[in-house]
Amino acid sequence: MIKLANLSFGYSKKSLLFRNLYLDLEVGHIYGLLGKNGAGKSTLLKNLAGLVFPNAGTCKVNGFLASDRKPAFLQELFFIPEEMHMPSVTATQFLNNTAAFYPKFDAIQFHKILAEFDVPSNSLLNKLSFGQQKKVMIAFGLSTNTSLLIMDEPTNGLDIPSKIQFRKIIASALTDERCIIISTHQVRDLDSLIDTLLVLHEQKIILNKSLDEIGERLLFSAAAQANTSNILYAEENSMGVNTISINAQQRYSKVDMELLFNGLLSNQAALTQSLK
Ligand SMILES: Nc1ncnc2c1ncn2[C@@H]1O[C@H](COP(=O)(O)OP(=O)(O)OP(=O)(O)O)[C@@H](O)[C@H]1O
């Protein structure tokens, strides 16, 4: 559904944010996009949404060049940016004005998600709190039922119960016809939600792997001290040490995304080699 080929992009030609990027993403998945501050996560998402254009290479979504911004491309895409300017209309008025752009929009679903999030549909959007505004856009984005839903830092501004609800609502919205991409710094917010991890680092996608594959190849453990052989990365904490090692015995462990992300930044070669 998404194909980036040889994509290079920079806000100035002299300093590229991405160089010769290749990336294939499919429907039926929830991707989590991680990267350090300034790595270019939001910019990558904007390339996918056709909001900025590559300097070289192509970005195709559903077969359309994102930069062409054809109606058939736009009606299958919903992008929730990190920060939004909300109009002075109610959620119901927003639906009446905007839903027509999305042929698969489901108004019942919209009101249902708003109710689950406990957001009033008759208050002016620009008078809602930041977290409530986010919830309205998440509810709207999900209800468009577009084949591509992109969310940039969606949990930023949500309180703890809402984050739990967010995970539940997103998980239930995934279908075989839909691809959801979520960028965040709050790795824990993606727990039990994403199935594939993308890591953007130093102009490249250095990881694009399902959590199942990661768990097959790597073993994540916590111990009083590092006592396993084949340790690829270790982080000490007050309780002992968290490690990533080669999963030679095919044991099950839950992928610790934060540990893996830190490990990739400090021992990229060994970890990516083990994940090949
Ligand atoms: N419109 C713009 N014009 C020029 N430079 C920009 C613009 N938008 C972003 N940048 C620069 O591009 C780089 C990547 O920014 P981007 O927002 O994509 O990173 P990010 O990974 O999403 O960061 P964060 O995690 O801090 O949100 C930064 O150095 C930023 O200053």
Image: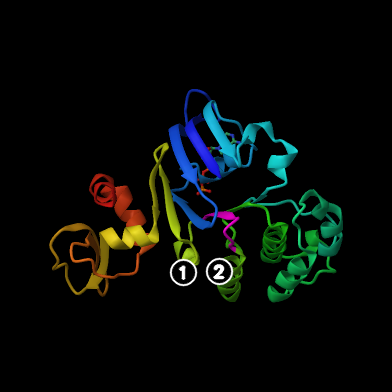
Looking at the rendered structure, the kind of residue marked 2 is Arg
Picture quadrant where residue 205 is located? top left
Residue at image location 50% in from the left, 47% down from the top: 25
Span shown in magenta:
174-184
Please give the label number shown on residue 167.
Answer: 2
Q: Residues within 10 Å of mark 2 (few under 14, many from 20)?
A: some
x and y, in percent, of residue 166 in the image: 59, 69
Residue 173 x %, y %: 62, 65
- How many angstroms separate mark 1 from mark 2 (CA)? 8 Å
Give the residue displayed 39% in from the left and 52% down from the top.
Answer: 209
Nearest to N terminus: mark 1 or mark 2: 2
- Residue 44 relative to residue 116: left or right: left
Q: Is residue 181 magenta?
A: yes
Query: Residue at 63% of width from left, 42% of height from top?
Result: 49
Image quadrant of ligand 1? top right
Residue 100 badge: none
Q: Position of residue 30 (x, y in %)?
A: 52, 58
Question: In the rendered image of this protein, does residue 131 appear above or below residue 48?
Answer: below
Residue 204 sits in quarter: top left
The reply to whether dot 1 and dot 2 touch (C-beta < 8 Å) is yes
Q: Which residue is mark 1?
A: 192
